[in-house]
Amino acid sequence: MLTILAPALVVALVAATMVGSLLLAHGVSSPPARATAAFLLGVGAAVVLGLAVERLPTVPFVDPFSVSASAAVAGVLIGAAVWELDLVGFLIVGLAMAVSLVAGRGLGSMLRTRRVQLIDLPPGMVSALDGVVLAACVLYPMLRLVAGG
């Protein structure tokens, strides 16, 4: 019974944390849409470029994890520059997003296949959003860190 309930509990906990983090993050910055828009730009770039590299034939020195992590950091920095946010603070947010995108991918793989498998395409149509869910979970704590408390 524990092997059935444990994954469902993990999914429920991560989903509740994600929703709470996004709702709280919406009120952290002065106009709330700016920080959320920078986050969405970063994860959007990460997902699109990660999926593109994942579907391409094998290219040496290019893997979906490094491309999506780099795209997340670059997207957040571009969003911070466009919306005149703190670049150093949002560099920290982008780095945390990059780590959580890869960790979320591993968590999604573990929940879907019951083993950590980062080398193959994960099963499922929305598996590209696994990292986004975990990145959304760390958004509010990182924005609070950047905002100074």
Image (cartoon, rainbow, N blue to C red):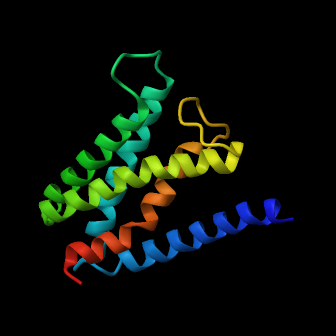
- Residue 113 drawn at (x, y percent): 70, 42
Is residue 72 visible in the rendered image? The answer is yes
- Residue 32 drawn at (x, y percent): 30, 75
Which of these two is toward me, 127 or 114?
Answer: 114
Taking the spot 87% from the left edge, 65% from the top edge, the residue there is 1
- The single residue placed furthest to the right in the displayed view is 1
On the picture, is 74 further left or further right than 117?
left
On the picture, is 65 further left or further right than 83?
right
In which quadrant of the rendered view does residue 9 lie? bottom right
Taking the spot 44% from the left edge, 29% from the top edge, the residue there is 52
Is residue 129 visible in the rendered image? The answer is no
Taking the spot 20% from the left edge, 57% from the top edge, the residue there is 91
Q: Is residue 102 above or below residue 5?
A: above
In which quadrant of the rendered view does residue 126 lie? top right
- Residue 89 drawn at (x, y percent): 18, 65
In which quadrant of the rendered view does residue 3 lie? bottom right
- The single residue placed furthest to the bottom in the displayed view is 149
